[in-house]
Amino acid sequence: MPVLTRDQEIRVITELLTSAGADPKQASVTATVLTEGDLRGFASHGILRLPYILRALRRGTINGNANIRVIRETPSTALVDGDHGLGHYVASEAMRIAIGKAKKTGAGAVGVRNTNHFGIAGYYAEMAVSEGLIGVVTTTTDALVHPWGGVEPILGTNALAVGIPAEPVPVLLDMAMSMGARGKIVQALKEGKPIPEGWAVDKEGRVTTDPKSALEGALSPFGGVKGYALALVLEILAGPLVEAAAGKAVVGTLEPVEGYSTKGDFMIAIDPSAFTDSSSFKSRVTSFIREIKESRKAPGVKEILVPGEPEHRTRAQRLQQGIPISEEVWKEVEKIGRELGVNLEELLKT
Ligand SMILES: NC(=O)c1ccc[n+]([C@@H]2O[C@H](COP(=O)([O-])OP(=O)(O)OC[C@H]3O[C@@H](n4cnc5c(N)ncnc54)[C@H](O)[C@@H]3O)[C@@H](O)[C@H]2O)c1
């Protein structure tokens, strides 16, 4: 299994994207966010997504040279048109705008339309955290999840990330609305393995552990009716509110489509100092977390973790030992390299 350093992975992705015509800065931001996905152990949102992005760049459904515009604005809000750019770049620019507004007014809420799949939502929430702010990020995807009591895929997996400053590491909730990622079901199908019960229903709405029937049916929301309810409201925030699509009209996040992707994003940055003294806020959050971590554990449990901790640990380990990339994904990357005339071996040496 190939193992890359963070710098190597960023270099490979940036070079492949620029060779396919993307602007170097937009390519480099995209490479950084994809690599963060792999560093944190979210392989389904790392370099694995590169072939899809390159296919879309080639078809022109992703614009690698986007000219992002704010098309509606108040002191604390903005609606951004992403010019169908690389979703990772567009989302990071949108969060930059939200952060600027939060620093001026206490909170900045930014909607994004005409954009593309942006990878891990947590990256953008953490951008706010690194400025001492709270970050909230959500997005939509193609319809994959059934409503509670329904059979058809109508809702997206609609990631939600919330980042909050704390010591020693920030709280970073970063999750999909489905029980399991679609990518993991595709993987189970390739490996001929069953999927866990509760992840999906077949096309008749029966719970299934067969990955093929699951892909023909729909993913189940996490947490039963409450996960469905949460996915629904997030889809409204990152859909109709920001002039993007909702439901089955959301397309282009899994594979390039005829036209452009119709997904949207919504993000908020909040300055704690608009409510309280920000350093005392951080220390109160930190002692709350300590209380949770020091609370009585269930039998057989060694440690209580807080959201973001598992990924933080994986990241620290991979920064030291490298990022394992699956053989299958690496073969595809090599193929793309050959097609684009990029010598990956050379790139990995430097
Ligand atoms: N761009 C998109 O359209 C899109 C859509 C869906 C998901 N995603 C991304 O996919 C990634 C994976 O999402 P997921 O739902 O599979 O994540 P997951 O189920 O692995 O983790 C969800 C959350 O639970 C926390 N967690 C896990 N174990 C824990 C424990 N023992 N104690 C405390 N907290 C714990 C994690 O820190 C994380 O915040 C995320 O980065 C998400 O943003 C993106």
Image (spheres, rainbow, N blue to C red):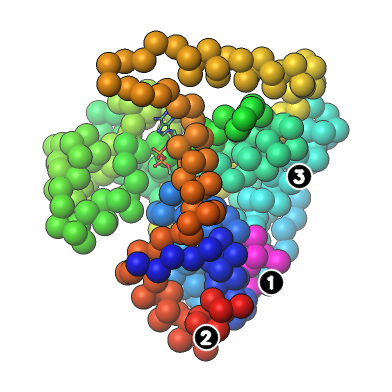
Relative to 237, is 203 on the left or the right? left
Instruction: For the N terminus, give its image quadrant.
Output: bottom left
Q: Residue at x 63, y 50 (%)?
A: 91
Assess disc 3: are there few (<14), some (14-19) or many (≥20) residues with their C-alpha within 10 Å of its C-alpha.
many
Residue 346 seen in this snapshot: yes
Precedes in sequence: disc 3 or disc 2: 3
Q: Amino acid at mark 3?
A: Ile
Q: CA distance from mark 3 to mark 2?
A: 37 Å
Ligand 1 picture quarter = top left
Mark 2, mark 1: which one is toward the viewer? 2
Q: CA distance from mark 1 to mark 3?
A: 21 Å
Q: Which secondary structure type mostly characterizes the magenta part of the structure?
A: helix
Give the percent coordinates (x, y) of residue 83: 65, 61
Relative to 87, is 157 on the left or the right? left
Helix, strand or loop under label 2? loop
Precedes in sequence: disc 2 or disc 1: 1
Q: Amino acid at mark 2?
A: Asn
Instruction: Report the disc number at residue 343.
Output: 2
Q: Amino acid at mark 1?
A: Pro
Q: Residue at x 35, y 38 (%)?
A: 178
Mark 1, mark 3: which one is toward the viewer? 1
Precedes in sequence: disc 1 or disc 3: 1
Instruction: Report the disc number at residue 97.
Output: 3
Instruction: Report the disc number at residue 24.
Output: 1
Give the percent coordinates (x, y) of residue 26: 67, 65
Looking at the rendered structure, the number of numbered marks drawn on it comes to: 3
Mark 3, mark 2: which one is toward the viewer? 2
Helix, strand or loop under label 3? helix
Helix, strand or loop under label 1? helix
Q: Which residues are magenta?
A: 22-30
Assess disc 2: are there few (<14), some (14-19) or many (≥20) residues with their C-alpha within 10 Å of its C-alpha.
some
